[in-house]
Image (cartoon, rainbow, N blue to C red):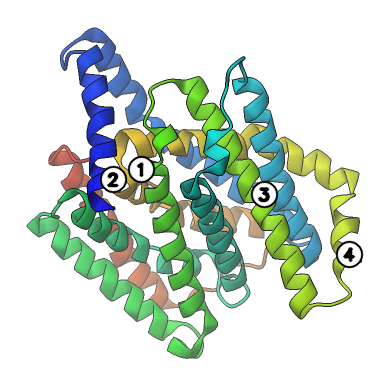
Amino acid sequence: MRDWLGNNRQASSASLLASSGPNSSSTRRTRHCCSVMPASANIARIGVITFSRARNRAKASDRWAFTFIQMLSGGVTLLIFAWRPGMSWRAGGRPLTWLFGLSRVTSAACFTAALVYVSLVEASLLGLMSVTGAALMAWRLRGARPGRAEFVCHTILVGGVVSLALLVEDGWRNPTVLLMAVSELAVIASTFTAEYHPENQTEDPRARLWLTGIALSVTAAMMLTARLGQTTLWADGEVAEIWQAVRDWRLWLIGGAVGVVLRGPATFLAFWAIHRHGADAYILATALLPVFGLAMEWALAQPGWVPPITLTLPVYAVGTAMIAALVTLALARLRAGQLSPKT
């Protein structure tokens, strides 16, 4: 499996180098364009979280339907824009596409469940475990061994996660700890799946749009299946509520707009950034979301859309140390050229 993944990436890199020299103007433009991909994906993702966080004060069936509509509308829109005669649906039948969808559904479900017990900021800080996990995965798959400074930063991040797990209510017995561990394992799985997906080895934006549309549509289908299965097994009698939420034209209006404007572009930019920079670099870039999460929760708390932030001083201290380690880690990798596009 490792050899297949490595060969897949090498073939893509070889074809790119063959078409453009390292110092050509087109390559420089490509590097400049790709350098903003993680930032652009982050901005779009923050927008999705902001709208979803404000909207998610509704009942559970509405929250699920809101995300489902985002996924479906974003995916279908991308398919419409990307379609051209001869486009293949092969990606829809690949196990990696379904693994991506399953991982996305698992991650979203566990992260949302964790927010029942802790704040968005605390959950996001616990989610930084994926940075170290992705680094270990990249070391295993690509031989990308972290430097000495990076090891120190990863040690601080791991120590911070352990400390936060002890600081939350009930400590290790809090369901958040297990939920976030599963969520971040799913994040790592989905991101590396996107990096090594055969259809994501192209430089053709239309082909990537097509793949992204299929991936979002598959994710929406799996989300619908999982929700109906959950309702049938553990919440008998709520199926009618689910269909009622799905038929709500207001949800389709708002969720569809978020899916078309934010969810679809965010996923497309994520696929592009992961291909050009690598899964571990992308996860590192998105790991600064706790900072934006803190600002977002404060802003949404002012009009009363979400409960006010009530973090304790130890959590603030641990979070500050983790963010400092995260920034140092990003700067160390930037200086080492490990965040530049893979050309």
For marks 3 and 1 on the same chain, the one whose residue lies earlier in the sequence = 1
Q: Residues within 10 Å of mark 4 (few under 14, many from 20)?
A: few
Separation of residues labelled 1 and 2 (CA atoms): 6 Å
Separation of residues labelled 3 and 1 (CA atoms): 21 Å
Q: Name the quadrant containing residue 29.
A: top left
Residue 266 visible in the current orientation: no
Query: Can you give x and y, in whole percent of width and height, for residue 165 in the image?
Result: 40, 81
Relative placement, left or right, of 209 versus 250 is: left
Residue corresponding to mark 2:
5
For marks 4 and 3 on the same chain, the one whose residue lies earlier in the sequence = 3
Q: Name the quadrant containing residue 228.
A: bottom right
Query: Can you give x and y, in whole percent of width and height, for residue 254 in the image?
Result: 78, 42
For marks 4 and 1 on the same chain, the one whose residue lies earlier in the sequence = 1
Q: Residue, x 33% and y 79% (percent of image)?
A: 162
Q: Name the quadrant containing residue 160.
A: bottom left
For marks 4 and 2 on the same chain, the one whose residue lies earlier in the sequence = 2
Relative placement, left or right, of 253 versus 29 is: right
Amino acid on which the number 2 mark rests in the picture: Leu
